[in-house]
Amino acid sequence: MNTINYRSIAIFIIPLLTGAVSTYFIRVWARNRAWDDFDNVQMFEKIADFRILGGTDLADRLRARAIPNQRLVTTFDIHSSFTTMDEAVHRHFLGESISVIHEMRPPRWFTFSTVADEALNQVLTHFEYPQRPLPLAKMARPFAFITMLYPLFGVMPANVNLDDAIQVSEEINYIWVESKREPIPDLRENKERLQDALRRLLPDKYPCTAEENPINIIMPAYETMWRVVLHTFLAAGFREVDQETEQQFREVIENVPECLTSNSLNDAGIMAINFAKEGLRLYPPTQRINRAIPPQQPNQQPTQVSANIQEAHRYTSIWGADVLSFRPSRFGPEKPPSAYMPFGAGRHRCPSAKDFAYKAIIIQVVALVRRLGIRDGGAKVRFNDPVLDNDGRALMPMGRMDMEGWTMEVGRGD
Ligand code: HEM
């Protein structure tokens, strides 16, 4: 009798105990993980905002940023805030960027939207869409490049030679990809072709010194832009999202650009900006921010440290269980968590972070939707990748070469 009682008690108690113990350990693990994530974010912030160097002056900060970016000097001849150790060059470049941004007073976003529509028309005609499948990355590059020529240089699409624009955007992409090789191949001819095409597109800017070369501002303003525009367009329009996001995206399509053209944003404007914010969270174009820490001894090399922005944007402990879903409504009216660093952090945060970049992104995304539609509108995106093509929730990769096989076709009822 006694044996039977013990056995039934054991049958009842053992699973309970096992459950309780494993729940306890899972909780401890999750809490430690959350602490680790929080520690990592703090470390990434310290790297991005230069506190990692200890007390700094501008010269130290410029050196810490310029050393890891020297590749850009060799390959593109960039002389800007990103590559210079000269305080005057930095101040001048920053001032120029800030004046581009200030020039875009709210009503000019109407013109920006028309410019984006015209730029897209030109590019789609070139690629003979919809008669032929549209190579998405090859389309997105000149589209964003021609559009950005308006705020950067006041150039309208009607005055842009499309072949030159395609040449610039393709050479930039090629040089960027090739410059990641070890050793870096000889890219002088590509750089010359790039400069020749820029000279034809922007004759007023030449002749110029290395510091005045238009490539300096084109790189931060356009090179980040085309990738996040393409990813946001696809994430909102062609990947699986929840119903709320689907409904909100329809409203954004209806309200952009009007909702972005007054001095203070109404609810529709905030919703539109949140789509750009979420695109930058899930697919930040600057995935890492690198700094060189000065050596302890004079004969040593500096150490390179990295703030992993993409990782900080994907911590479940910070963003919630749906961290990998595209859900713009996660951004409320309050400031995003400090883990949100698509524009860096602290004193050298990107000057376009206040609203310029968000508006430029969402207006270009909506221009794409107006011409190319979204998932229910007949157009079909093919990633030519078994995972992405079969699982609508899988994250899209962000490497430049990963996007080359992505195409769009007008659906044929399949
Ligand atoms: C999607 C758009 C953009 C993204 C994601 C982006 C990202 C960034 C990031 C991550 C930094 C910090 C770099 C560091 O700490 O080393 C930065 C700085 C900077 N960005 Fe942007 N950027 C964008 C658009 C622009 C545009 C449109 C301009 C100019 C019109 C611009 C000009 C600058 C400048 C001048 C700095 C240096 C600021 C300083 O040193 O104080 N960026 N950007």
Image (cartoon, rainbow, N blue to C red):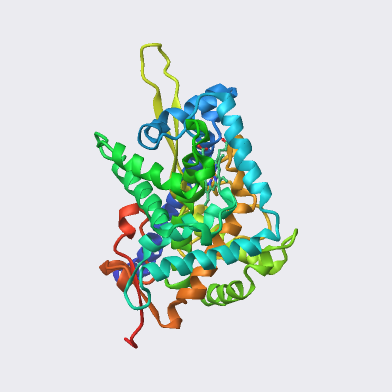
Residue furthest bottom as drawn: 413
Residue furthest top as drawn: 298
Question: Which of the 4 image quarters holds residue 389?
Answer: bottom left
Residue furthest right as drawn: 263
Residue drawn at x 38%, y 67% as measured from the top left: 126
**Rendered location of residue 147, percent (x, y):** 52, 58
Up-down relation of residue 293 to residue 18 (above or below): above
Residue 31 as seen in the image, left or right of residue 191:
right
**Rendered location of residue 50, percent (x, y):** 54, 31
Residue drawn at x 70%, y 58% as measured from the top left: 106
Is residue 368 visible in this depiction of the protein?
yes
Quarter of the image for the N terminus: give it: bottom left
Residue closer to the observer: 188 or 367: 188
Ligand 1 occupies quarter: top right
**Rendered location of residue 145, percent (x, y):** 47, 55
Residue drawn at x 41%, y 57% as measured from the top left: 141
Residue closer to the observer: 377 or 240: 377
Residue closer to the observer: 10 or 207: 207
